[in-house]
Amino acid sequence: MTFFDNVFREMDSLQPILGEDPVFLAALEHVSRLAPIERPCLVIGERGSGKELIAARLHYLSRRWGGPLIKVNCAALSETLLDTELFGHEAGAFTGATKRHIGRFERAHGGTIILDEIATASPVVQEKLLRVVEYGEIERVGGSEVIEVDTRVIGVTNENLRELAKTNRFRADLLDRLAFDVIAVPPLRQRYDDILLLAEQFALEMTKRLGRSVFPGFSRNAAEQLLHYPWPGNIRELRNAVERSIYLSEDDETPLANITIDPFEDIWSETDRETPTPAAEVDTPEPDANIDFKTQVANFEIKLLEQALRQNANNQTEAAKALKLNYHQFRRLLEKHEISTQR
């Protein structure tokens, strides 16, 4: 197999980056501008938002695309193991070190190294990272030879490194070197236009995996669930919810009726029902009480929407901001409740 066969095989194995929302497209444009510069940088974002895919894209859009792409999860290794894994060690450096070990930085020479969860690196490792980022030099553990490496460093984290630096939990000088530029991966709740696009892709993949012939689509109720849930776990949580719902559905001919977002819901609810509640704390409605929950909720939403419109002179953008919604969410709620904005 040739060099290019290896490269293209690795590129083909990458997950595609799907998205059409303007917020996400702006982030991709940022990546395209930064990739050729080949300076150290940071990729930040919430858990499950696709930070590693963005970091890999920085590599493959740079002139280093033909070089190695090495990934290290700093949180998965102890301080000692991370030290030797990144910088290597000489034979006899410690008990059990029977032969020389070439570290990840040497293996990434001419390419890129992605340091995932970089905020968890110990002060000792951070000091060595500062040297390699600043001067391109490393020393293997137990060795004295200075080794030059040409490796682009991309730090990935969901932590606020600036705040950590203020409290001396992350080296400020290392942050200065890494933050040549910072790519902020938007959370899924800010990518409103991408939610159904991604959900359908995950549904198609799961349908194929289950050996079913066709995905019948999402019902209106399921689509509303997908669009109005905040997705704290972002794309990873969305994928799990969609795949779980497809797997649990026994009807593959009609649109999916419901999205099972929380697999623990029934379990914890059952547990709660088994826990007795003191009679004095129970607010029991009158026997003839007849509360229409959906109507009450709908009326409350309508009241909030109309009040926001009045207070902002029917300006939908400002009204959405007042309710801490994005414009698309606000518009969908107006359509849902058939609220006219004509004065």
Image (cartoon, rainbow, N blue to C red):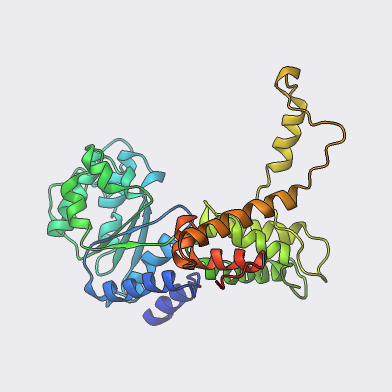
* Residue 332 place in picture, x, y as percent: 60, 67
Q: Quadrant of the C terminus?
A: bottom right
Residue depicted at 39% across the width and 56% down the height: 45
Q: Is residue 1 above or below residue 109?
A: below
* Residue 138 place in picture, x, y as percent: 17, 53
200 horizontally vs 250: left or right? left
254 horizontally vs 228: left or right? right
Residue depicted at 57% across the width and 59% down the height: 306
Residue depicted at 50% across the width and 67% down the height: 314
* Residue 94 place in picture, x, y as percent: 27, 37
Residue at the far front in the pictured view: 343
Q: Quadrant of the N terminus?
A: bottom left
Residue 138 visible to the viewer: no
Determine the image quadrant of residue 312.
Answer: bottom left
* Residue 238 place in picture, x, y as percent: 59, 59
Residue depicted at 25% across the width and 70% down the height: 110
Q: Is residue 118 above or below residue 196?
A: above
